[in-house]
């Protein structure tokens, strides 16, 4: 803004001197213009400062609330497990069904709280980054074994293909795991009938290339430009009432960007989606 004010003032003085004979009038016009521009600059700066402060307070509020909610949710999950185990008294079959509903919903709440806390840390720049060498293949295989029961229950087959012996990457394994976990979870959830998920892993120059392809509901063309925004969910997903907060892909892209990688996707509504990402082998 300062450069604009100085430049505008000089231009005004030069033009005024050319068309106005009285130098005092030229000076007054230039002075009034400078004062006017300074007032505008001050107002804009104040507005941006207030907006930044509001965003900071919002992020802090989300962070505090998320921290405070984690403990009671963990206690709730623990209490439900104890009740379902029958260790403090016999429970009827109908009661077990209600406890299962409570357990499922407490799990969803805990997942949402964890996502909100992660988003808050990303926005505040406090998401911890602990880099070490590890095989991305091991992370993927472990997650596939974790998600296999969920996939089978959803009538989905997971196929994994890699191009042989791949080098280790130097990054944060917990954050990379969170990325793959979100992408795999989305792929399973957005397949509405019998489906297949294909995962590929290979080396491309100095990067490791990861790809996950599904034959799910896909992403409408008009929604694709918003897909990595916070809380955004496609209209076709809402029709199927699929669970989710709309934070997963925002978290994924933020982590990959921080890790020095790239991410993208191709999708067609009704035919499925392919998400890909690259991570540097050394960084």
Image (cartoon, helix red, strand yellow):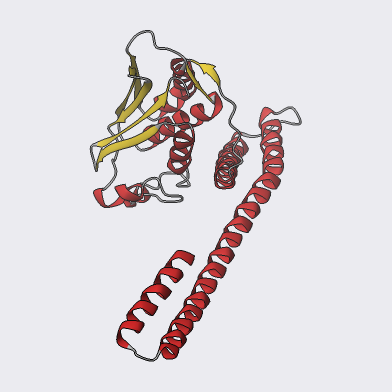
Q: Position of residue 78 (x, y in %)?
A: 70, 34
11 in relation to 148, above or below: below
Q: Position of residue 83 (x, y in %)?
A: 70, 34
Q: Nearer the viewer, residue 138 or 32?
A: 32
Quadrant for residue 202, please give it: top left
Whether residue 191 is visible to the viewer of this picture, yes or no, is: no
Tell whether 90 sits left or right of 54: right
* Residue at 39%, 91% in the rendered image: 22
Q: Nearer the viewer, residue 169 or 86?
A: 169
Tell whether 62 sits left or right of 242: right
* Residue at 39%, 30% in the rendered image: 154
Tell whether 87 sits left or right of 224: right
Q: Nearer the viewer, residue 43 or 3?
A: 3
Tell whether 40 sits left or right of 74: left
Q: Nearer the viewer, residue 159 or 266?
A: 266
Of all residues, the one furthest to the right in this rendering is 88
44 in relation to 263, above or below: below
Quadrant for residue 151, please give it: top left
210 in relation to 110, above or below: above
Quadrant for residue 17, please give it: bottom left
Whether residue 87 is visible to the viewer of this picture, yes or no, is: yes
* Residue at 43%, 41% in the rendered image: 249
107 in relation to 212, above or below: below
* Residue at 35%, 77% in the rendered image: 14
Q: Position of residue 281 (x, y in %)?
A: 43, 20
Q: Position of residue 153 (x, y in %)?
A: 42, 28
Number of labelled discs? 0
């Amino acid at each position: 803004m300062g450069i604009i004010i100085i430049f505008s003032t000089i231009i005004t003085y030069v033009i005024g001197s050319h068309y106005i004979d009285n130098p005092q009038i030229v000076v007054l016009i230039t002075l009034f213009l400078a004062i006017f521009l300074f007032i505008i600059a001050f107002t804009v700066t104040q507005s941006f400062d207030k907006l930044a402060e509001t965003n900071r307070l919002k992020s802090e509020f989300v962070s505090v609330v998320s921290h405070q909610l984690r403990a009671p949710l963990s206690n709730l999950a623990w209490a439900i497990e104890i009740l379902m185990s029958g260790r403090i008294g016999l429970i009827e079959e109908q009661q077990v069904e209600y406890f299962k509903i409570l357990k499922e919903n407490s799990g969803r709440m805990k997942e949402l709280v964890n996502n909100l806390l992660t988003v808050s840390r990303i926005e505040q720049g406090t998401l911890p980054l602990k880099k070490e060498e590890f095989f991305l293949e091991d992370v993927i295989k472990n997650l596939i074994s974790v998600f296999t029961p969920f996939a089978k229950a959803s009538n989905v087959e997971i196929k994994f293909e890699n191009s042989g012996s791949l080098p280790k990457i130097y990054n944060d394994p917990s954050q990379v795991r969170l990325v793959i976990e979100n992408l795999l979870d989305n792929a399973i959830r957005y397949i509405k009938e019998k489906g297949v998920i294909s995962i590929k892993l290979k080396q491309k120059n100095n990067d490791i290339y990861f790809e996950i392809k599904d034959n799910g509901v896909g992403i409408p063309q008009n929604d694709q430009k918003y897909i990595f925004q916070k809380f955004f969910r496609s209209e076709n997903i809402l029709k199927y009432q699929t669970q989710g907060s709309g934070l997963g892909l925002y978290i994924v892209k933020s982590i990959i960007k921080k890790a020095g990688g790239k991410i993208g996707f191709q999708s067609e509504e009704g035919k499925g989606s392919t998400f890909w990402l690259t991570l540097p082998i050394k960084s």
